[in-house]
Amino acid sequence: MAGKFVISKDKRDEYRFKLVAGNGQTIAVSEGYTTKAACVNGIESVRRNAATAEIDDQSFAAV
């Protein structure tokens, strides 16, 4: 089964989305959005940008 975006409302009455893999595991969770339209726009932004996003591995950086 393919992954999906799930939209919900949180305790602060804000909309959030999470990206859920086909096996049911949550992959990513968004910030809170004041409107559902803004939340859907956030999903569309992830769809547009994630496929070509580079990986910036900073795990080796000194702390």
Image (cartoon, rainbow, N blue to C red):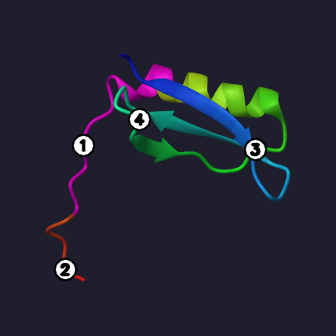
Q: Which element type, helix, strand or loop, lies under badge 1?
A: loop
In the picture, residue 61 is in which quadrant? Answer: bottom left
Q: In this image, 3 relative to 17: left or right?
A: left
Per the picture, the main secondary structure of the magenta-coloured stretch is loop
The residue beneath circle 1 is 55
- Left or right: residue 40 versus residue 59 is right
Say which amino acid is labelled 2.
Ala
Quote the CA–CA distance across marks 1 and 3: 26 Å
Label 3 amino acid? Tyr
In this rendering, which labeled residue sits more in front, label 4 or label 1? 4
> Which segment did they paint magenta?
47-58
Q: CA distance from mark 3 to mark 4?
A: 23 Å
Q: Earlier in the sequence, mark 1 or mark 3?
A: 3
The amino acid beneath tag 4 is: Gly
Q: Which residue is labeled 2 in the image?
A: 62
Name the foreground residue: 41 vs 27. 27
The residue carrying mark 3 is: 33
User: Picture coordinates of residue 2 (x, y %)?
Assistant: 38, 17
Residue at figure coordinates x 32%, y 24% from the top left: 52
Disc 1 marks a residue whose amino acid type is Ile
Which is in the foreground here, disc 2 or disc 4?
Answer: 4
With 24 as the anchor, is 7 left or right in this view? right
Q: Secondary structure at mark 2?
A: loop
Residue 17: percent from left, percent from top:
62, 38
Residue at image position (24%, 43%) is: 55
Q: Position of residue 62 (x, y in %)?
A: 19, 79
Label annotation for residue 24: 4
